[in-house]
Image (cartoon, grey):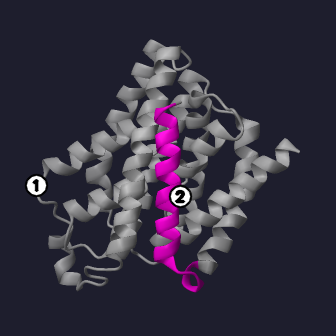
Amino acid sequence: MQDLAFVFAGFLVGTIVGLTGVGGGSLMTPILIFFFGIKPHLAVGTDLLFAAFTKLSGTAKFMRSKAVDWRVVLNLSAGSIPAAALTLWALHHFGAASPGVQKLMTTTLGCALLLTAAATLYKALRGKVGPQHIAAEQLSEATRPRHWSLPLLFGAIIGSLVTLTSVGAGAIGVTVLMILYPRLPLPRIVAADIAYAVPLTFVAGAGHAAALGSVDWPMLLKLLAGSIPGIWVGSHLMGKTPERVIRGLLSLLLAYAGSKLLAF
């Protein structure tokens, strides 16, 4: 029965990701901790590879349509990948399963979920504003950040946050990109966010598996078995559902999960 529950959880999260674009880590990690009683370090490690595989299919789709701006991806990765490696070293040094690190994970995860809830609600209330398309000759200028150091700084913050909690590369990442690249069309911002999350979550997830042993492989396969058809269903329902209502309700759910984790 629990095997089917894992598959259903993967399907549910995959559907919501396909429907709203909100990162799976914001949903899957709290579900694993609260509903299945999984230890925080195992939930985070397993969910990182879960996110890597689910975002890989989205990246392939954006690559086929030539919507990924690799300059933006490289700028963020230059900050996030080293920060992920440094965070993995710290987890290995202090012990991912130690009570102090477990408490740090749940507290940081709670704060990250509250930030994700705020970013999701902001996007729901703001709606689809800003440029949706851009001329080819303007693209080079649009992919220049406000300052060269900002992608490195925010990439490092997100890299550490994702490695520690598996949350941050979704709604938070999109919000950061909107601030750093205000002239970049929203579809390209989403494409860049998903593309740079793939190497980040793979590196962080592989580090959790190899250095920390905090990946439950049978559970991961069950989650992916549900999420792959779930993403397909969610993406096909995207144009038939009130996006603002769904994002608003989702932000409340994330805020509830975040506040509960802070009191965990």
Q: Is residue 17 above or below residue 152?
A: below
> In terms of sequence position, does the residue under pointer 1 or pointer 2 come before the other?
2
Element carrying mark 1: loop
Looking at the picture, how far across and down is residue 150, in whole percent?
A: 17, 49
Q: Amino acid at mark 1?
A: His
Looking at the picture, how far across and down is residue 47, in whole percent?
A: 59, 42
Residue furthest to the right: 1
Q: What residue is shown with label 1?
A: 147
Q: Residue at x 44, y 60 (%)?
A: 194
Q: Is residue 165 above or below residue 177?
A: above
Q: Residue at x 35, y 77 (%)?
A: 127
Q: Amino acid at mark 2?
A: Lys
- Measure the C-alpha gap from mark 1 to mark 2: 28 Å
Quadrant location, the N terminus: top right
Q: Is residue 142 magenta?
A: no
Q: Are marks 1 and 2 in contact (CB under 8 Å)?
A: no
Task: Say whether residue 249 is visible.
Answer: yes
Looking at the picture, how far across and down is residue 126, in whole percent?
A: 32, 74
- Crowding around mark 2 (Cα neighbors within 10 Å: few <14, some 14 to 19, many 20+) is many
Q: Residue at x 49, y 58 (%)?
A: 252
Q: What residue is shown with label 2?
A: 55
Looking at the picture, how far across and down is residue 14, in whole percent?
A: 63, 61
Q: Residue at x 12, y 59 (%)?
A: 146
- Crowding around mark 1 (Cα neighbors within 10 Å: few <14, some 14 to 19, many 20+) is few
Element carrying mark 2: helix
Residue 11 shown left or right of residue 109 in the figure: right
